[in-house]
Image (tube, helix red, strand yellow):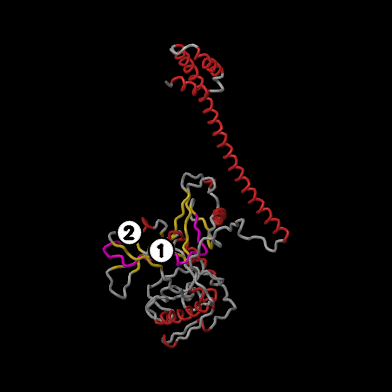
Amino acid sequence: MNHQPNCSEVRPLMEQQTTPVTSTPRRPTSDSFDNSDGNRQRMKKRLRINDLPPRNEQVEQHHLPTLIPPHHHQHSFNMNILKRAVSSNLPCFFIIFSASVEPKYIPSSIQVAIMLKKLFADNQIPIKELSMRVQAGERRFKFAPLLLPDCYALVVRCVPLDINQDTAQQEILKTIPAAVGFSSIHYHHRQRSSYDIRFTVRSLEQYQTALEVGRLSIGQHYLPLTTFLTGYRLTYCTACWKIGHIRDKCQSSVSCRKCLIPYTNGVKHSCQDIFNCAQCGGNHYSLHSICPVVKQYKEELKLAVDKALTSGAIKRSIPEEVSRPFQQHANDFPLLNQAKEMSDLVVTIKALSETMIRTEKSFNDLNNCIEAQHKSTVLHCNSICTIIDTVQIMSSWVQDSVLTQWENNPCPLSNQFIPLNVLTYNVQGWGTRALEVMDLIFKVDSP
């Protein structure tokens, strides 16, 4: 599996195992799985084992109901029977390796079981153990989980009879790809124009999402989707086929399920297909629902189980959230009982930090003001330089204009001597006495 991770697939078995999940002895696997040739071989071995001397165990009298009318039965149930009544069916699944995987790379069933357990652990999927792990062929392994409760089963209600089960199954798989183990439920005790379909969901996320939606579309119908209400399982013996005890507590020989004739070692059993009930002696299977003893037993078992569930003596398996690894954050668990000095130091450091922040902000504001003043000073200097250039240009033009008007003035020369000296003095100091020059020009231009 490690060498070819993409070449394997998991196929759930449609038939479900009925091994109870309790601490009591379990029935042999040959009684729970499909009837194949290998199972017949194991049945013969089991027959040979029954030829051994019986055990020194006495069967409890209250476990063996007598053939009396149903209303006279008063069964008593121990805790093992009550636990088995609410235990879950255990479907097994196959792991198949493709033909492209070389035989030397195919691991053993134990190695595959170890890989599966590690895979479940890496994905935080709670699983205890595998109740069975065998090699079922050259490239196929068969596994049975210890617990896959029927509470993961859903039922599509009121499917019209004109929609066959194959079509409905395809529509369900389109909506819930993780659905497996389809079976139809027909109600023969009353006439209905529809039937129900039961299936199991392998994905917890898809199971919970489907329940939240509560509806499923099949064809043009929008049908309700509900949980499967699991019935209470009977405790019965696979040797004598009587209810109330299991095979490990029975001293009887293994008998035929139909005719109740004990098997003989080395002799092939020839059943006449004559039904004989181990409970009431009627012409039906020993565990058939029409048996009055079985009916009475189921009624009493239901009352006892309901009482045990209410009192908390036993618990029914329910879907649980997938466990996630714990992650601790920095502030989840603060330290307690800190020293007063440390608290004062923390307060002081916090105050200093706030002061430094305010000081840094003030420095930034001051820096902005200095930059603004610098820009204003540069602008002022540029303005002064422009004014000086303008004055120098005007001085040249004004001086030429004044001298021209002076020379062309018709006044006597004696009246012009003093103004000429003043003009010469003022013109020579033009650079620093511009206002006086402008005043002189105004006087010259006046009549």
Q: Nearer the viewer, residue 6 or 58?
A: 6
Q: Is residue 273 magenta?
A: no
Q: Which residue is mark 1?
A: 212
Q: Is residue 138 above or below residue 423?
A: below
Q: Nearer the viewer, residue 41 or 124?
A: 124
Category of crowding for the residue at label 2, using alpha-carbon neighbours closer than 10 angstroms: few (below 14), some (14–19), many (at least 20): few
Q: Position of residue 381 (x, y in %)?
A: 55, 28
Q: Which mark is residue 166?
A: 2
Q: CA distance from mark 2 to mark 1?
A: 25 Å
Q: Nearer the viewer, mark 2 or mark 1?
A: 1
Q: Is residue 151 magenta?
A: yes
Q: Position of residue 432 (x, y in %)?
A: 56, 22
Q: Is residue 217 above or below residue 298?
A: above
Tag 1's secondary structure? helix
Q: How many marks?
A: 2
Q: Is residue 288 above or below residue 119?
A: below
> In which image quadrant can residue 182 be found?
bottom left
